[in-house]
Image: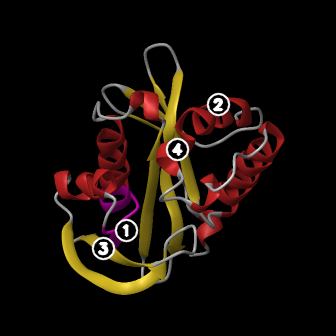
Amino acid sequence: MNPIMKDIKTSIETERLLLRRPEAGDGAVINEAIRESIHELKPWLGFAQKLPSAEETEENARRAHAKFLTRESLRYLVFLKEGDVYIGTTGFPDIDWDIPKLEIGYWVDTRHSGKGYMREAVGAITQYALNELKFARLEIRCESENMKSRAIPEALGYNLEGVLRNEDFSVDGERLTDTCIYAKIRT
């Protein structure tokens, strides 16, 4: 089946969170979170190497919406149910519908870090991908030194399948880094 024909949830709820696809107008709240978190995100994420303008962030959110519709990638913005506060992003940036397998990515606004929100959000999309979308393999890849990011797959029962040594450059291009590959498979 052509992936564009697959019914994909545009929103997912957890006990404390609402995850939903990006919509036009979301750029402002995303940009504010990036501004508040830039120093924590910069060592790990390419998009945080320079502070994007609000317009650039809005363009990115609209492209993410379009890719959601075409099923190229499925991004979910994470909001607190109480107060409708944006706290981060998660989703499936790399999907292979033929295998089927995908990679999960995430980042959290520094102001909301350490409260278990991203673990809750990633846990919800993990269950959705395995149980409803029937993906055979889920991966989370992160730099070996990013202990906060590594804590999420470890807490959710992903298996560390390996560490690829000197596999990539740091986001600033200054040094070689090791990449941890965590995976969950549907049995």
Q: Does the magenta-highlighted stretch encompass residue 37? A: no
**Residue under label 3:** 180
The one of 122 and 112 positioned closer to us in this rendering: 112
Tag 3 or tag 2, which sits nearer the N-term? 2
Q: CA distance from mark 3 to mark 4?
A: 22 Å
Q: Which mark is residue 143?
A: 1
Q: Report crowding for label 4: few under 14, some 14 to 19, many 20 or more residues within 10 A (C-alpha).
A: some
**Image x and y of residue 42, in percent:** 54, 53
- Look at discs 3 and 4 and give the one toward the viewer: 4
Q: How is the image coloured?
A: secondary structure
- The residue under the point 56% across, 76% down is 1
Q: CA distance from mark 1 to mark 3?
A: 6 Å
Identify whether 76 is placed above or below 138. above
Q: CA distance from mark 2 to mark 3?
A: 30 Å
Going by the numbered disc 2, the residue's amino acid type is Glu
Where disc 1 sits, the SS reads strand
Q: Which residues are magenta?
A: 129-144
